[in-house]
Amino acid sequence: MSTKSGNVIVDILSLDHEGHGIARIDGKVTFVDGALPGEQVEINVFRQHAKYNSANAVAILKASAQRTTPRCTHFGRCGGCSMQHLEPSAQVASKQRILEDNLAHIGKVQPEIILPALHGPSWNYRSRARLSARLVDKKGGVLVGFREKRSSYIVDMTSCEILTPDVSALLQPLRELTVQFSNADRIPQIEIAVGEHITVLVFRLLAPWNDDDAAKVRAFAEQHGVQVWEQSKGPETVRPFWPETAPELNYSLPEFGLSMPFRPTDFTQVNTAINRALVSRAMRLLQPRTGERIADLFCGLGNFTLPIASSGAEVIGIEGSPELVARARENALHNRLPNARFAVDNLFEMTPEKFAALGHFDKLLIDPPRSGAIEVVKSLPECSESKQRGAPHRIVYVSCDPATLARDAEVLCHVKGYRLAAAGVANMFPHTTHVESIALFER
């Protein structure tokens, strides 16, 4: 049905994996930003493709019972969140459906057990962020924050509901500081890392600070109790600026008695509470035991490796980044875990021969990036009985992309002889469409 304005009234049938409502106009799929299943919505189609339309919700004529008022005043414009209009428990249920749909349609598998979703705080959870910065004369200063949806512009924001409260409170002071710099137009990014006892700000500098700038930075760091680092080029140029010597960033895994120091640009999970819950679940599913030999693939700085080692099992962590492997070794020493060893290897180039050369593993933990671990799973021994003896009998797979998990699950279940014993989601990024999940494969 068309309105006088040329907009269209549609019924929303479901939700896609990016949080858009799905409707049909004359049989053509239309993705509607800001709409929820069960709603009747007036929409404006802003782009027509050969096979689908893209649209915005202009008015909600019949609202879903799961619709809620977004807490953030920037929602709808900011690209940082896309689901604040959906009640938090419904967000998690949507992510669980996405996981199950991917497993069924891509992997052609179904978990025997659906694990309860891992929940944590819905607000002020984010301890890592890359904030854009830009000098905008029309705004009378520097903008610091997330980019707008479908745009390179930066949201004019002075607070954020998903950043930790201390970091949110720094947004306005950072704007006031950065505009005073001689190189204010040469600072494209400020990366933030929050540890248990300290917050670090990493300024990406395309031109160096002068002496007056440096004095302002030192005063800001002292006033707000933060460390300031600088980065002139690639990751290797990241270094402390003020104070020059300070305590390390770290997070802890109290259930396992572990402390994990890290550098501000090291990869760590953004949600401390969910990371702890995810590690705990991974260990319960993996069930590491003294006397077992276990591999942690894509191990990073040892987030799962060291909890495995704390069980008494012999564990080898493998990671493609030499810097992260060095950090993992330091963390093993820091936590007095000599049974954790580490190696640098490109796991995207794994082969059956290379995997066999690593020796027998009783169990595996796999935690790959979004592209998944297809070469690893293809390299596992085949399911024939004669070869099965060298294969890990249990695999815990932690995923940040349900599509690549499902692709890899198809190989594990239909080629390598595993069964998908359990799977479930962890709400690592509330109010976004990001789906973090964990799956257990057994032989």
Image (tube, helix red, strand yellow):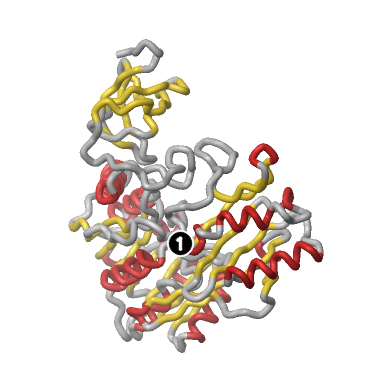
Question: Which residue is situated farthest in the left direction here?
Answer: 112
- Element type where label 1 sits in the image: helix
Indicate the quadrant where residue 288 lies.
bottom left
User: Is the N terminus in the top left, top right, bottom left or bottom right quadrant?
Assistant: top left
Residue 223 x/y as whole percent: 61, 70
Indicate the quadrant where residue 35 lies.
top left
Indicate the quadrant where residue 303 lies.
bottom left
Give the residue displayed 37% in from the left and 34% down from the top.
34
Give the residue displayed 33% in from the left and 41% down from the top.
85
Q: Is residue 343 visible?
A: no
Residue 202 x/y as whole percent: 63, 63
Give the residue displayed 55% in from the left and 67% down from the top.
266
Question: Which residue is situated farthest in the right direction here?
Answer: 211
Amino acid type shown at disc 1: Pro
User: Is the C terminus in the top left, top right, bottom left or bottom right quadrant?
Assistant: bottom left
Residue 283 x/y as whole percent: 31, 73
Give the residue displayed 61% in from the left and 57% down from the top.
174
Question: Which residue is situated farthest in the top direction here?
Answer: 4
Q: Is residue 2 visible?
A: yes
Q: Which residue is mark 1?
A: 165
Task: Please state the total of marks drawn on the protein image.
Answer: 1
Left or right: 136 as drawn, with respect to 27: right
Q: Is residue 186 above or below residue 267?
A: above
Q: Nearer the viewer, residue 286 or 187?
A: 187
- Label 1 CA crowd tier, 10 Å (few <14, some 14–19, many 20+): some
